[in-house]
Amino acid sequence: MKYVEFDQTRPMDLVLIGRVAIDFNPVDYFHPLSECTTFKKYVGGSPANIAVGITRHGKKAGFIGKVSDDQFGEYVVDFFNKEGIDTSHITKCTNGEKLGLTFTEILSREESSILMYRNCIADLQLSVDDIDEEYIKNTKAILVSGTALAQSPSREAVLKAVMLAKKNETKIIFDIDYREYNWKNSDEISIYYSLVAREADIIMGSREEFDLTEKLIKPGRTDKESAQAWNNENAKIVVIKHGKKGSTAYTNDGNDYSIKPFPVEALKGFGGGDGYASGFLYGVFEGWDMIECLEFGSAEAAMMVRSHSCSEELPNPQEVKDFIRETKDKYGEMIARV
Ligand SMILES: Nc1ncnc2c1ncn2[C@@H]1O[C@H](COP(=O)(O)OP(=O)(O)OP(=O)(O)O)[C@@H](O)[C@H]1O
Ligand SMILES: O=C(O)C[C@@H](O)[C@H](O)C(=O)CO
């Protein structure tokens, strides 16, 4: 069953727009950040991680973004190139802006946090001149990370991409991806999130992220009410995530499908969302039934919360299938399905 009809003649599957940054994850984890002395460097930033994930699933991805004109900028572009992600639309900042640095804190298996260095930030320098209509015309879908809407000029760049996607019948995936430290006030969040959500074919976010989106429209909606409202706009699929409690996909035929997290011994609390998006969207591109897409997303999310990185350990489809098989053999066939 196909929920989204992609134009199969287009060479690119997914173009992601937003931040690529660098994660420094503690090697001596289970200590407060102030006590950690050793960190491992990875490419990070939610849309960058999803670009890696989707490429490892054999899909052709490209990235529209801004990086710093320095060794770290080169590092992320080299990493993308090695992964097979098209970097032709990643440009360097010209005024000394720097890539975001993310120091993560893994206090325990249950408690993690993220400390971002994002002053004079490269990714939000993306401008309307970086958005090329031909590039958007040649991809089946774009994925907009909500963080890219936080400030100008990136905000206008994203809105231009969304307008051109509409014009060229390129599908729009909106990953709300709320990162508090980028925003000045909650009205702006609701204004810009809802603008993109209205146009999107697929919306993915947590309950909190939908609440932020709907603040100026109708606060206090239930999941079902939110899904119905966005399904009545353009969304074919609305995914609402509840962290460790699981997630539900609402399709525009009025059905809903729920999945529980796969049981794993988590190492950290972040990174699951990007694994989830990679696995879930792979299933959607393949035209799978919704419950299969959710199962793949949930499995990949579980694999990522037990991993040290949010990018380097993203699995390929066979590894996800093996993980699902092994987990079902251990816990029973219906382990994750509600
Ligand atoms: N402890 C866990 N064990 C197994 N799966 C988990 C666990 N925590 C989260 N997940 C999975 O990861 C998915 C995404 O988690 P969450 O809702 O926290 O997303 P997010 O905030 O987008 O994540 P991220 O930090 O990557 O941005 C969940 O829906 C669930 O399937
Ligand atoms: O960029 C972030 O918001 C956090 C990163 O540490 C991480 O790569 C991530 O994006 C998890 O979703």
Image (cartoon, grey):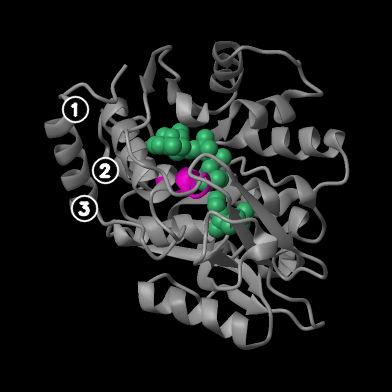
Indicate the amino acid at tag 3.
Answer: Glu
Image height check: is 32 above or below 199?
below
Residue 237 visible in the current orientation? no
Q: Residue at x 31, y 61 (%)?
A: 56
Q: Quadrant of residue 54?
A: bottom left
Q: Which residues are magenta?
A: 269-275
Q: Is mark 3 within 8 Å of ligand 1?
A: no
Indicate the amino acid at tag 1.
Answer: Tyr
Q: Which residue is mark 2?
A: 286
Q: Which residue is mark 3?
A: 319
Q: Nearer the viewer, residue 204 or 14?
A: 204
Q: Earlier in the sequence, mark 2 or mark 1?
A: 2
Give residue 255's position: percent from left, percent from top. Answer: 39, 13
Q: Which residue is mark 1?
A: 331
Q: Earlier in the sequence, mark 3 or mark 1?
A: 3
Under circle 1, the secondary element is helix
Give residue 273's position: percent from left, percent from top. Answer: 49, 43
Distance from label 3 to label 2 (Cα)? 17 Å
Give residue 176's position: percent from left, percent from top. Answer: 62, 40
Q: Residue at x 52, y 39 (%)?
A: 110
Residue 90 in the figure: left or right of residue 280:
right
Under circle 2, the secondary element is helix
Residue 252 in the figure: left or right of residue 194:
left
Residue 330 is covered by the magenta coloring: no
Q: Residue at x 61, y 25 (%)?
A: 207
Q: Residue at x 41, y 70 (%)?
A: 85
